[in-house]
Amino acid sequence: MIEINQEVTQYRAYLTLANFKQSTVSAYCRTLEQFYHFHHSLHAEVIPSQSHVQNYLLNRRESGKSWSSINCDYSSLRKYFKQLKDFEWSLKKMP
């Protein structure tokens, strides 16, 4: 099982060392934490995949979040999975 706090701490360190603004670091880490809580509520024992990320983004949209919030979520999760997890990423932005 993925330790959410550990993942968020590692992501925060990566973003800080990559010289992201503190507001961006906070937003991206919050997104990662929310994604993992969402993922664990549905698939606790399954390693996240792109389809899980897409489901999370769709859920955020259906719950009334703005496009700018969803775009920030997408950017955060894309950076996390591509840079920290060396995850193959082909998920395009939703139209």
Image: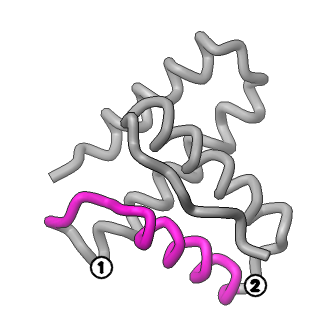
Q: Secondary structure at mark 1?
A: helix
Which residue carries the number 1 mark? Answer: 42
Tell me what residue is drawn at x 83 percent, y 70 percent.
67
Relative to 3, 79 lies left or right? right
Give the amino acid at mark 1: Leu
Which residue carries the number 2 mark? Answer: 64
Tell me what residue is drawn at x 43 percent, y 37 percent.
8
**How many neighbours does mark 2 have within 10 angstroms: few (below 14), some (14-19), or many (20 or more)?**
few
Q: Secondary structure at mark 2?
A: loop
The residues tagged by marks 1 and 2 sit, at their Cα atoms, a distance apart of 20 Å
Residue 60 colored in magenta in the image: yes
In the rendered image of this protein, does residue 29 appear above or below residue 53? above
Q: Quadrant of residue 24?
A: top right
Q: Residue 11's spot in the image, x, y percent?
A: 48, 30
| Quadrant in which the C terminus is drawn | bottom right
Q: Residue 40's spot in the image, x, y percent?
A: 29, 67
Q: Considering only order in the chain, which callout, 2 or 1, is on the residue closer to the N terminus?
A: 1
In this view, which residue lies farthest toward the bottom? 62
Relative to 41, 29 lies left or right? right
Q: Quadrant of residue 69?
A: bottom right
Residue 27, numbered circle: none
Give the amino acid at mark 2: Gly
Tell me what residue is drawn at x 72 percent, y 72 percent.
94
Q: Residue 75's spot in the image, x, y percent?
A: 68, 48
Along the line of sight, the residue nearer the viewer: 34 or 18? 18
Q: Residue 36's spot in the image, x, y percent?
A: 39, 58
Query: What segment carries the magenta color?
Result: 45-63
